[in-house]
Amino acid sequence: MLLHNLRIAWKSLKRNRALSVLIVTGIALGVAVSTTFATVRHSYAKDPIPTRSDVLYYVRLDSWDPLKPYPGADSTLPPTQVTYRDMAAIMKSDIPRRQSGMFKTALYVYPDPKIGRPFREIVRLCTSDFFPMFDVPMLYGSGWDRKADAAPEPVVVLSREMNDKLFGGKNSVGKTVRMSDREFRVVGVMGDWLPSVKFYDLTQNIIDVPETIYMPFNFVKPMQLRTFGNSDGWGSSGGLSGFDGFLQSESCWLQMWVELPDRASVEKYKDFLSAYVLDQKKHGRFQRPLNNRVSTVREWMRDQRVVPPETTAMLILSLLFLGVCAVNLVGLLLGKFLSRSSEVGVRRALGASRADIFLQHVVECELIGIVGGAIGLLLSLGALLFLNQWLKTTVTRGDFFRLDVPMILLSIGLSLAAGLAAGLYPAWRTCRLAPAAHLSLQ
Amino acid sequence: MLSMKNIRKIYRTDLIETHALDGVSVDVAAGEFVAVMGRSGSGKTTFLNVAGLLDTFDEGTYHLDGQDVSRLSDAEMSRIRNEKIGFIFQSFNLIPDLDVFDNVDVPLRYRRLPAPERKERIERAVEQVGLLSRLRHLPSQLSGGQQQRVAIARVLAGDPKLILADEPTGNLDTLMSREVMDQLEKINEAGTTIVMVTHTPECASRSTRQIHLLDGEVVNLDLLPPEGPAEKTAASYAATLP
């Protein structure tokens, strides 16, 4: 019966093409606008690492100035990053299964002169745990080991793009790359890895692409590497000067991630952090109230306001627009259905119940919704393409706003809901027509 | 087959009450071919609507095929219309964008019959009315007579116990009218009860019995007074008939 009703609905759509085009266009516009803004919001809000987000935690400690809170939209939050000495201290904990302090810096890379001139590249310093902790796919080789962390050994992991650039895309494991004044051995080449937002470092451009070169964190001292990201500080460096002074200062410039496999280990780690801070208080640091944060990926994203509030507002407005489109179509559909009242009378005479007539017309509305939704989806793809092109002017990625499966399903849902909203009342009115009054007996 | 007792149907507006059926009592036995006659406004159409469960009534009782159908739900009335009653209309009432096959298929769809059975019934019914070669034609591609034959095929496919026909030849020329009446006669001979509203004495003469309606009442022409109010005399009534 459903297929039969769909066939009737299709014939009905073809019968009055101009009216059908008008109705379908109304739905298409509403669906296009709402799908576009839903996708924009979803692109920011979705879980960037769904396979691991339940065990990953971002660590923050409130080592800030006792006289004023850390500046930001929410004054209850601690600094977004940790100091070098705090990171070095809490990295000694054996509670996390994996952990990594990290930051990005800029280094000159010296490729084979036959390939090109030296260039400056953003490099991430992290521990070996970075790769398994964030489920980074490997094309060749692997990340380095903990022994390489401790030494530190001059090893690097390259992104696929950097491997293409330096080694023509061939397996470069074992080959060397000169960065700054040192030679680094390639131990791994990453596969395609592009989280929706750069969750592991939300302190700057959140939709930037991951770095192309990764090296052991412990090169920070021997190479005296400073951050290329944010560095918020206060107070003095305790009498030390130069790079050592920077490392001992209250500058917060490191991101700290831990992998905690279960609730118990989370609680245990929080206790460990509290104990550490209380101990530091005895040495005159951490004069603000205890305010440690061990945040899930989602909590970290929320605190960093990854989802721009405008996108939520636009989504609400676009849904209202879809609602207005649907409501405007009620009258058109009612007119369309009532113009066929004699056919309804015939069908009723031939045995159709009110429910049959209602279902027939609801199916027609849903067909309109689906056709309108399909067109709306195409329009939305075009709009997202435009937005991605616009985004490309500020970041190096052109696929941030992606119409993924949940958004396609949402679009279908919106189409069906709009079709139903527009057609429910007309279908109900039509099925209530008295058959005798609308049957052409003469 | 059809038994109405004291049926009243009143149409009300703010200003006026119209007694469309005013105590109508009619019995039609199974296998009968009854012609319902009466002048315009006499209540024929209302009678047919009530008989076909297309309209409700205010008073009285109605038994169809032994079942009291006086107060049924919409779904129950729809089922009875679908299974027991076949309609033939003056204006054919085919659905314009469905071809012959699909038009005949409509009542069978609502009966939820399986596809092979529907196909078999449709082809047999369309063959009976001689239109098998036009199975995929739209109503607009058929003559009036052919369209009425499709409407008859639609009834035949449903195999109803009762056929309600409203001026089935009203839009047809003489030749086609005869063909349609021949078809109805054949259907009646096969045992199906037919109640037909008609103005045409020729069509009425094909029936086995005639019922006359006057101002919402069944009248016996022989019992109408020779004198009285002008509109209620046998002579004035007879004068209104063609």
Image: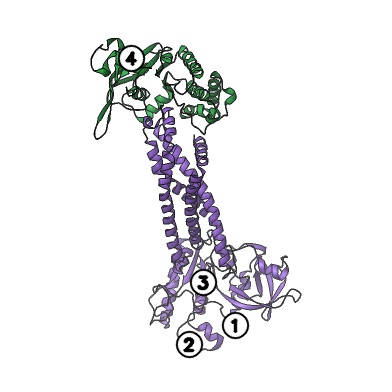
Q: Vertically, is A322 above or below B191?
A: below
The answer as to whether the residues below labels 2 and 3 share one chain is yes
Disc 2 sits on a residue from what chain? A
Residue A245 in percent (x, y) is at: 52, 86
Q: Report the amino acid beneath label 2.
A: Gly
User: Which is nearer the eye, A170 or A29?
Assistant: A29
Q: Quickly name the residue at label 4.
A: B238
Chain (purple)? A
**How many marks do you count on the picture?**
4
Residue A367 in percent (x, y) is at: 50, 43
The tag on residue A238 is 2
Question: What shade does chain B have?
Answer: green
The nearer-to-camera label among 4 and 2 is 4
User: Which is nearer the eye, B79 or B14?
Assistant: B14
Q: Are marks 2 and 1 in contact (CB under 8 Å)?
A: no
Q: Which badge, 2 or 3, comes first in the chain's sequence?
A: 2
User: Which is nearer the eye, A388 or A45?
Assistant: A388
Quadrant location of the C terminus of chain A?
Answer: top left
Q: Are marks 4 and 1 in contact (CB under 8 Å)?
A: no
Q: Which badge, 2 or 1, comes first in the chain's sequence?
A: 1
Q: Report the amino acid beneath label 3.
A: Met
Q: Are marks 3 and 4 in contact (CB under 8 Å)?
A: no
Q: Report the amino acid beneath label 4.
A: Ala
Disc 4 sits on a residue from what chain? B
The answer as to whether the residues below labels 4 and 1 share one chain is no
- Secondary structure state at the residue bearing disc 3: strand
The nearer-to-camera label among 3 and 4 is 4
Q: Is residue B15 left or right of residue A148?
A: left
Disc 1 sits on a residue from what chain? A
- Secondary structure state at the residue bearing disc 4: helix
Q: Residues within 10 Å of mark 1 (few under 14, many from 20)?
A: few
